[in-house]
Image (tube, rainbow, N blue to C red):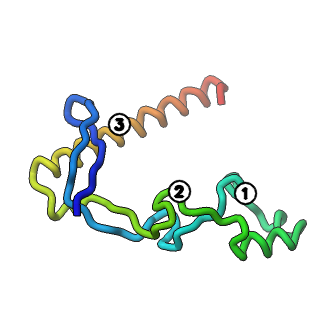
Amino acid sequence: MLVTMKLHDREGDVVEVSLPGRYEVCPRCGGKGSIVNPAVDGNGLSDRDFEEDPDFEEAYFSGVYDIPCLECLGKKVIAIPDVARCNFAQKRLLVTERRWQKDEFDYLALCRSEQRALGIV
């Protein structure tokens, strides 16, 4: 099977590549195929939320608020690159993408830190 992905090359341009792939259990839903709607518990719930409304607790745990997983779309698995089957050039693209993602993450963390220092957020 092939997995088509959009990755950043060395110049930072986005390129579409097909890589050897394999299926893995969805990390978001754990293979269940559904998750609780983030609009319901996206900000977190406490014991108090359930104590105040026992019907809500029952509905919550029975799956009333579940929606198809946003990652696997209910398929329970996702396709990921099979690095062991990639050639050297494909592995280099994956490493370049990981570096790009790390740099982007670090940059955003620095921006958030500066915003906190300035009292913006």
Which residue is at 52% across, 67% downward?
29
Residue 116, x across and y down, in percent: 61, 30
Front residue of 104 and 53:
53
Q: Is residue 88 shown left or right of residue 30?
A: left
Tag on residue 40? 1
Residue 60, x across and y down, in percent: 74, 69
Occupied quadrant, residue 102: top left
Question: Which residue matches tag 2?
Answer: 70
Sequence order check: which comes first, mark 1 or mark 3?
Answer: 1
Q: Quadrant of the N terminus?
A: bottom left
Label 2 sits on what residue type? Leu
**How many numbered badges does the structure rendering display?**
3
Instruction: Calculate the distance from the C-alpha at mark 3 to the C-alpha at mark 2.
Output: 25 Å
Viewer-nearest of labels 1 and 3? 1
Instruction: Calculate the distance from the C-alpha at mark 1 to the C-alpha at mark 2.
Output: 15 Å
Q: Quadrant of the C terminus?
A: top right
Q: Label 2 near label 1: C-beta < 8 Å? A: no
Label 1, secondary structure: give it.
helix
